[in-house]
Amino acid sequence: MGSNILVTGGAGFIGSHTVVALSEAGFNPVIIDDFSNSNASVLAGLRDILGRDVPCYAEDCNQYNLLRKILHENRIEGVIHFAAYKAVGESMQEPLTYYRNNLGSLITLLDAMLAEGVSNLIFSSSCTVYGDPDTPPVTEETPIKPPASVYGNTKQIGEEIIRDVCQAKSLKAVSLRYFNPIGAHPSAAIGELPKGVPNNLVPYITQTAAGLRPELTIFGGDYPTPDGTCIRDYIHVMDLAEAHVSALRHTLSYPETRYYNTFNLGSGKGHSVMELVLLFEKISGLALPSRIGERRAGDVMAVWADVQKSANMLGWKTKRTLEEALQDAWRWQQKLNNL
Ligand code: UD1
């Protein structure tokens, strides 16, 4: 029997794919998710893929007594903490909501873990902590920049809280800095379910191709990049999910009682918005309606990951191509819209 792992936000985009990766690696995931930004249909999707139900508490994880009970009753050995609000624009409008939810739940979770003697934590962080880097790729030693958003600040402060707790208490934790997760499970049983108009590029592309949006606006065509559009490091969500399994094995087997580290999770390659649009057109055989618009406030020009540390210390690297990620994202969108 593998270890029991609590996955907060396990019904979300990255959380649900990580539940699959954990199960396939022999762990027993237990989900807590309040479904504030996810859908109960995810649980049916997980059942289709795994052939069994994954235990799920439909609850807000900002509840100390409940968390202690869940950790205790399920004999949890490690926690992967995804549960958080993630809309950059909304975080600027509602800062207290973001600080209370993202940092409050982290502190509550840490308290409950320490009280129950659960000593392994994987934290969902973001490459947003690097801001606009002077010279990509960014390594984990690249200086952290002042956060560009309240959301970004909750990730920076979250990392600091965990680092400080690891210095003082018996806790082994890693923060995983995600670059741009895209794609879906290849079965199309689970994928990304953005609420309302998507902010992120790939759901916007697939919704436009599905006829739900009239056209894609490319935010800025005059950046000093080879084709004038921004460059990001897109990573298949299943590669990202598998990195959590590697990170968990890393902390579970770490021989000290106090440990903290940070890892970049990306493909290590940068691709422009225009490259994604052209590749999507090739894969789908569709002409994607698009136009170049204004730059989006807060966007950085180019960022991609140096993934050497993750490769060396976690023994992990991406296996899937950008093409596969776009194919899987498109298959998921087609299933959602019965195309
Ligand atoms: C955004 C968030 C980041 C978060 C990440 C994952 C911002 C400033 N950053 O990253 O904090 O961790 O999502 O959820 O919001 N683009 C278009 N047209 C669109 C949408 C996007 O041209 O309709 C471009 C953007 O300008 C960018 C690229 O596509 O160059 C990727 O954008 P997006 O998917 O929103 O991710 P990030 O902005 O990199």
Image: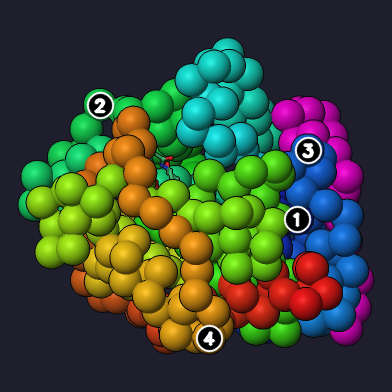
Residues tagged 4 and 2 counted as in contact (Cβ below 8 A): no
According to the picture, the residue beneath numbered tag 4 turns out to be 285
Does the Cβ of the disc 3 residue fall within 8 Å of ligand 1? Answer: no
According to the picture, the residue beneath numbered tag 3 turns out to be 36
Q: Amino acid at mark 3?
A: Ser
Where is the C terminus found, in terms of image quarters? bottom right
Q: Amino acid at mark 4?
A: Gly
Rounded to the nearest angstrom, the CA distance separating label 4 from label 3 is 35 Å
In front of the other: 137 or 75 = 137
In front of the other: 304 or 214 = 214
- For image coordinates 67% across by 67% down, the residue present is 210
Rounded to the nearest angstrom, the CA distance separating label 1 from label 2 is 31 Å
Residues drawn in magenta: 51-75
Residues tagged 1 and 3 counted as in contact (Cβ below 8 A): no
User: For the residue carrying disc 3, how many other residues have a C-alpha within 10 Å: few (<14), some (14-19), or many (20+)?
Assistant: some
Does the Cβ of the disc 2 residue fall within 8 Å of ligand 1? Answer: no
- First along the sequence among labels 1 and 2: 1
- For image coordinates 35% across by 44% down, the residue present is 293
**83 above or below 31?**
above
Rounded to the nearest angstrom, the CA distance separating label 4 from label 2 is 42 Å
According to the picture, the residue beneath numbered tag 2 turns out to be 146
Q: Is residue 58 visible?
A: yes
x then y, percent, for residue 260: 37, 48
According to the picture, the residue beneath numbered tag 1 turns out to be 11
Mark whose residue sits in front, 4 or 2: 4
Q: Is residue 145 left or right of residue 124?
A: left
Q: At numbered mark 3, what does the secondary structure look like: helix, strand or loop?
A: loop
Q: Amino acid at mark 2?
A: Pro
